[in-house]
Amino acid sequence: MTQLTLKINGQSHSIDADPDMPLLWAIRESVGLTGTKYGCGVAQCGACTVFVAGQPVRSCSMPVSAVGADEITTIEGLKSKEALAVQKAWVKLDVPQCGYCQSGQIMSATSLLELNAKPTDRDIDLAMNGNICRCATYVRIRAAIHDAAKSLEG
Amino acid sequence: MMGSASLKNAALAIAAGAFAAGILMVAQGLLTSDADAAIQPALKLQPVASFDKIKNKSQRAVALFQEAGKVINSPRCMNCHPATERPTQTDRMRPHQPLVVRGEGGMGAPGMMCTTCHREANFDSAGVPGNPKWHLAPAEMAWQGKSLGQICEQIKDRKRNGDLTLAALVKHMAEDELVGWAWSPGTGRTPAPGTQKEFGALIKAWADAGATCPKG
């Protein structure tokens, strides 16, 4: 076990962890932020997506020791204008069904809009197809991202 | 009697469990097929000295490149030199899952970059390979579907090899960190044949012998 300090959503958290433990477990079990979900554990579903240094990362496939001093943002700490627009669009279009994958979906959608203010359908598909939704809400997800992009135009 | 809130919570719990179970079934299927394909003994490379008996310089160069071609044709190299914008993966060289594309600089699409999953090092517990330089080869360096002779001509062509001189090409093959990943690919993946040092020596000997390419 190693003493590590994680910067998550603007706060520092000291934890004792195996350096090879996936970041996801540090976030959920050691720090107690359970908005980030476990889906597959092998970077195939996107449910565990968080930001590390502002970039989307599958937290199940990154060892906690590799984070270093980088800032981690989870679904609980999202507050960019793009994130707020995505969350509003999610509510407006009633996107989630069971909701399990939605924190990962929102993280990826937010990252896309931070990088591309006016994504096409193809841009959205390419950015989001690593986020699996067992309820198949893909059509609503795509519509909500377009809606969020439009709302950000002002 | 369960209240409506309890019923909703129970339904959500079942749905969440079903989601995780479903994903695990898919992932286990993928990993099983990877393992089946990956149990291959690593091939060896003939040392450069074993080609000394070929006195004709051009023929020796061709033979050296054909030996080096065991590495070039390995899935560890081919998977990231795809003919399309989508890489392949595993020893079976199946399309990469999830769907990813080359994108700008070979780094993927905005929002779904290589670094979203592939980090600084292999992470075997999740079965995800990694390297600090992880990226796809550009389209002009596509190898899949090409003969060894075509690949040979391509990697010598400075318009298609990143403007590398032969000396720089030798250095790239012998020392580049991402090329070197092919011999340390993590659990469940067959390494490229031989070692990077042996591969680099073959490429250097090929260049020194005139860099003649196999025909076809």
Image: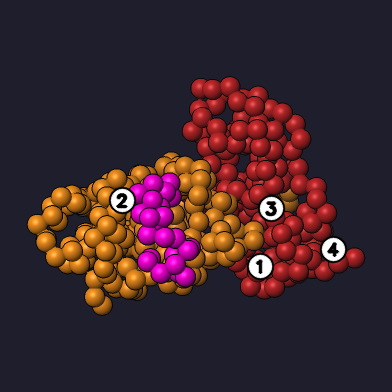
Chain colours: A red, B orange
On whether residue B161 falls in the magenta region, the answer is: yes
Mark pair 4, 3: CA separation = 17 Å
Q: Is residue B105 visible?
A: yes
**Spot occupied by residue B141 in the image (x, y as percentages of width and height):** 43, 67
Mark pair 2, 1: CA separation = 41 Å
Q: Quadrant of residue A135?
A: bottom right
Name which residue type carries label 4. Leu
Asked whether the beta carbons under mark 4 and mark 1 sit within 8 Å of each other, the answer is no
Q: Alpha-carbon neighbours of circle 4 within 10 Å: few (<14), some, or many (≥20)?
A: some
Q: Residue furthest right?
A: A154
Label 2 marks which chain's residue? B
Q: Which residue is mark 4?
A: A152
Choose between B61 and B84: the one closer to the eye. B61
Name which residue type carries label 3. Met
Instruction: Determine whether the residue tagged by mark 3 lies in a helix, strand or loop.
Output: helix
Mark sitting earlier along the chain (1/3): 3
Q: Nearer the viewer, mark 4 or mark 2?
A: 2
In the image: residue A88, left or right of residue B78: right
Mark sitting earlier along the chain (4/3): 3
Span highlighted in magenta in the image: B155-178
**Spot occupied by residue B107 in the image (x, y as percentages of width and height):** 56, 58
**Spot occupied by residue B180 in the image (x, y as percentages of width and height):** 38, 47
Asked whether the beta carbons under mark 4 and mark 2 sit within 8 Å of each other, the answer is no
Q: Which residue is mark 3?
A: A107
In the image: residue A107, left or right of residue B96: right
Q: Which residue is mark 1?
A: A124
